């Protein structure tokens, strides 16, 4: 797998299958299906991760930080500020019914 991380906070923002063509430019990142306008070659990094080193929990954008420097194996840490979007939707649905 490939992940694009934000160099400022090491958040894993996107993942792609191995072999995906990703082009990092001065002002954006181009992927086969979309363009990432708020990330670029200066503030981001593409990291290859063996499948066995993916996090145990289901991966979602910004849910984990990634530190490849701590050990030889990938180090995933759950982002304490991350909120499951389903929980937010449930809260909104509950508020609408009131």
Image: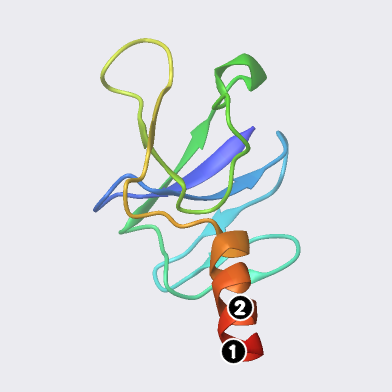
Query: Residue most toward the front?
Result: 98
In the image: residue 10, left or right of residue 13: left
Say which residue appears at 65% left-offset and 79% top-offset.
93
Q: Is residue 50 above or below residue 6?
A: above
* Disc number for residue 94: 2
- Provide the secondary structure element on which disc 1 rests: loop
Which of the 4 image quarters holds residue 86?
bottom right
User: Callout 2 environment at 10 Å: few (<14), some (14 to 19), or many (20+)?
Assistant: few
Say which residue appears at 39% left-offset and 68% top-offset.
26
Say which residue appears at 70% left-offset and 33% top-offset.
18
Question: Residue 66 location in percent, x, y?
Answer: 38, 35
User: Callout 1 environment at 10 Å: few (<14), some (14 to 19), or many (20+)?
Assistant: few
Question: Residue 39 location in percent, x, y?
Answer: 42, 66
The mark lying in front, picked from 2 and 1, is 1
- Provide the secondary structure element on which disc 2 rests: helix
* Disc number for residue 98: 1
Q: Quadrant of the N terminus?
A: top right
Question: Residue 8 location in percent, x, y?
Answer: 24, 53
In the image: residue 56, left or right of residue 6: right
Q: Is residue 21 above or below residue 85?
A: above
Q: Is residue 77 above or below residue 97?
A: above
């Amino acid at each position: 797998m490939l992940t694009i991380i934000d160099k400022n906070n090491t958040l894993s923002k996107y993942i792609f299958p191995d072999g995906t063509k990703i082009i990092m430019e001065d002002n954006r990142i181009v992927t086969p299906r979309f363009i990432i306008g708020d990330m670029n070659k200066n503030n981001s990094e593409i990291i290859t991760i063996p499948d066995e080193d993916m996090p145990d929990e289901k991966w979602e954008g910004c849910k984990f930080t990634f530190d490849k420097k701590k050990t030889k194996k990938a180090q995933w840490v759950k982002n304490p500020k991350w909120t499951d979007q389903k929980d937010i939707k449930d809260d909104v649905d509950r508020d609408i019914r009131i």
